[in-house]
Image (tube, rainbow, N blue to C red):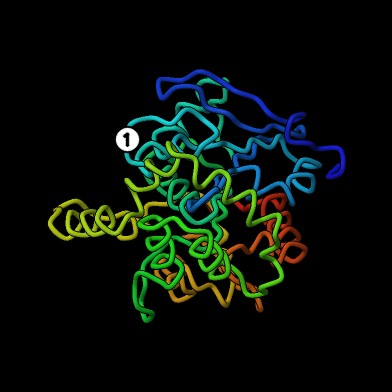
Amino acid sequence: MTSELTYEGTKREVATDLGVLRYHEAGDGPPLLLLHGSGPGVTGWRNYRGVLGDFAEHFRCLVLEFPGFGVSDPGDGHPMVMAGASVGMFLDAIGIDEPVHMIGNSMGGIVATNVAINAPQRVNKLVTIGGIGKNVFAPGPGEGIKLLMEFTDNPTRDGLIRWLHSMVYDPAVVTEQLIEERWELATEPKTLEIAARMYSSTAFAATAAAARASGATPYWAQLHRVQAPTMLTWGRDDRVSPVDMAMLPMRDIPNAELHVFPNCGHWTMIEAKQAWVSAVLAFLTRTEKASDR
């Protein structure tokens, strides 16, 4: 199945109030929505192309491209806010009103978790890849986030390479092909401008200050509201969202399990591909007892 799936062959698009959302679709079965992370040159296809074939053998896989990351229409809002709004719009636009499984990488995990909190009828089972929760022991922001801000403030090729290396445990994962494809999209003017809304040092500081001044309850303090069975996956050596961030969601989500993969950084689905796919498929395909929901 994996060898049969191509970028062009799986590419789709749909019109929404946020503009045209593009996505990739493969496989048949229960719907599985895959949500990508953030960072220079990211796309849903690049996050999940290596595992899409494995999941397409069991599910109707939908890899959504969030607004503002260079594939779907750009939008004029904060990338995280647009991403959160896009999920419901996308599912409505393609006619899915049943609960779906969701896999979210990093920022995509935060988006999916917020959906599970605020629209529980949308989520069947939830899988996150790093990202969610709050630093308990490690300082925040993590090394990878600081390097991401440095690149956004001063987008150089060397800065991109430093950031990419912070995402992985094994430096060999950062190939010339990966660098080139990330660099091409990350430096596209509109994509870079939108990234600055979220990850420039000025925007990041403003967001942190607004959060400190706000009386709103942050999502990580509402994790007890997640009704969906949840699988938290983490690279033990994650330098973007340190593994101690898993402590709050592991404890507070009523039906959560934590899987930590050794010798693995932030991209668990890439560096620990075989073990990660095996564990996630087992979780998504097993039958849950009524008492577990």
Side of 16 relative to 105 (left or right): left
Q: Is residue 180 left or right of residue 277?
A: left
Of residues 42 and 214, the one drawn nearer to the viewer in this rendering: 42
In front of the other: 192 or 74: 192
Residue 154 versus residue 258 in the image, above or below: above
Residue at coordinates 35% horizontally, 69% vertically from top-left? 141
Residue 149 lies left or right of residue 104; in this view the side is: left
- Amino acid type, label 1: Gly
The crowding category of the residue bearing disc 1, from other C-alpha atoms within 10 Å (few below 14, some 14 to 19, many at least 20), is: some
- 175 to the left or right of 217: right
> Looking at the rendering, which quadrant does residue 178 occupy?
bottom right
Point out residue 103 in the picture as x, y percentages from the top left corner.
58, 49
Instruction: State the image coordinates of residue 19 (x, y, percent, origin top left).
Output: 44, 22
- Find residue 207 and report its horizontal and vertical position in percent: 24, 54
| Residue 1, quarter of the rendered image | top right
Q: Nearer the viewer, residue 165 or 278?
A: 165
Q: Name the residue rendered at 45%, 26% in the picture.
A: 89
Using the image as rendered, state which of residue 284 and residue 164 is in the foreground.
164
Image vertical order of residue 24 relative to residue 240, above or below: above
Residue 54, placed above or below residue 92: below
Please give the name of the residue rendered at 66% of the width and 65% of the height, measured from the top-left corner.
Answer: 174
- Label count reads 1
- Which residue carries the number 1 mark? 77
Residue 284 position in % (x across, y down):
67, 51
Q: Secondary structure at mark 1?
A: loop
